[in-house]
Image: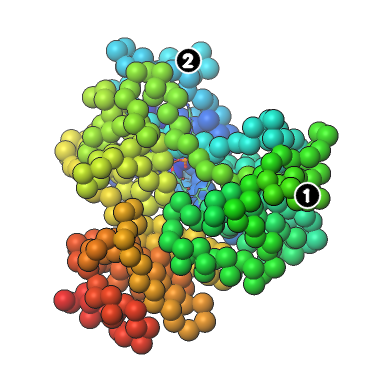
Amino acid sequence: MGHVIVVGAGQAGASCVARLRNGGFDGAVTLIGAEPVAPYQRPPLSKTYLMGDMTLERLFLRPESFYAENDITLRTDLRVEAIDPAARTITAAGETLRYSDLVLTTGSAPRRLPAAMGGDLKGVFLVRDLGDADAMAPLFRKGARVLVVGGGYIGLEAAAVAAKQGLRVTVVEMADRILQRVAAPQTSDYFRALHKAHGVDLREGVGLDHLVGEGMVTGAKLSDGSELDLDFVIVGVGIAPATGLAEAAGLVIDNGIATDAQGRTSDPHIWAAGDCASFPHQGARIRLESVPNAIDQAETVADNIMGAGQEYVAKPWFWSDQYDVKLQIAGLNTGYTRVVSRVGQGQTASFWYYREAELLAVDAMNDPRAYMVGKRLIEAGKTADPEIVADPEADLKPLLRS
Ligand SMILES: Cc1cc2nc3c(=O)[nH]c(=O)nc-3n(C[C@H](O)[C@H](O)[C@H](O)COP(=O)(O)OP(=O)(O)OC[C@H]3O[C@@H](n4cnc5c(N)ncnc54)[C@H](O)[C@@H]3O)c2cc1C
């Protein structure tokens, strides 16, 4: 009888073990996580949970009883330190466990500010774990002064929560514009205007020079020479895939733990899924940092451990919530040559990315129909007539029938 060990009790790890049991796997299943709690959802950490609108209980992906009821051994607060692929064992806290298949769902680690910039002062927070959100939540008091370093989705979501709670919020983004790495200028313009309308002091093309404080952060000096007095700082400057364990075991790393189309790493008994894994996609190798990818890829891996022999076909989508705007993104915009804007009433807008005539992706703000139509077209390999897209009065649904 087999023993599947899953390392990393986050979104992908939880999805993998659940799928193994739903799919009828009758060997032993162990899920090991370094955090002290059962698997939970991360997206609310910079949204409703940080806002205080979601209970801890609702954050958990499954009730704790789920694991025992499904004969899944959940080991929390345990960091796996090494893998021996030849012996098919892992070691954690002096204990050695043998596996028939090993799944690495180790996620990613947030980039920290270097200590030389004040990154280790008290009052400087990352937004990755439940512990991070719980530690900063009490500081979200009306009038408090917060600096958000990094204008990516997570930084902007945290800024939105802070502004909604009446904090005085400054965001600095070193690049020319917020969301530069992930979105078109049109999407950056939309979210810049939204944050400014909520009183956020948003500074683009301005980086952090260093934080100021003795023990506790009290201020910041920015790259343009300006200075800020602060109560705390939130750092959202990107993440790196957690590949250390895999690398030390000699697995091939290529922008993440490299897998084949089925999710298998360079070792035939070791698989990877979620934020930590890179995989073949339309002739390239990509890595996705999103909940839908973590779920779908981990479920494919579970199916393949049970012998399905299936290839993982990513259907990328993502979302972000800021103030009363819901952004939904379908597809991947890499390599776009043109963006078509569809601007409706109020805050409704969508931006459609094309590579020549091919539709690649859609950013839809408060427009679930544009998102739904765009997603279905992209998944079917169809495009959308830019003239119809650009006309906010034109019905999009007929595009699906063409
Ligand atoms: C604040 C925030 C907001 C987000 N918002 C969105 C959103 O709106 N939409 C969206 O699609 N995605 C969002 N994401 C991204 C999404 O949460 C991740 O893509 C997803 O959680 C990836 O799942 P995962 O299982 O690969 O990694 P994780 O959920 O990060 O889980 C990995 C786990 O592995 C553990 N681990 C690592 N190494 C070891 C080891 N050696 N031994 C034991 N355990 C180990 C880690 O402690 C961690 O618990 C957000 C992420 C954050 C942090």
| Element type where label 2 sits in the image | strand
- Residue pictured at 64% horizontal, 72% vertical: 197
Residue 105, picture quadrant: top left
Type of amino acid at the residue the image marks with label 1:
Glu
Tell me the quarter of the image containing the N terminus: top left
Residue 97, picture quadrant: top left
In this view, the residue in front, 50 or 377, is 377
- Residue pictured at 47% horizontal, 77% vertical: 348
* Whole-percent x, y for residue 316 in the image: 33, 54
* Whole-percent x, y for residue 274 in the image: 38, 41
Q: Residues within 10 Å of mark 2 (few under 14, many from 20)?
A: few
- Residue pictured at 64% horizontal, 32% vertical: 114
Q: Which residue position is annotated with label 2? A: 95
In this rendering, is residue 62 above or below 333?
Answer: above
* Whole-percent x, y for residue 300 in the image: 26, 43
Q: Is residue 356 left or right of residue 33?
A: left
Q: Residues within 10 Å of mark 1 (few under 14, many from 20)?
A: some
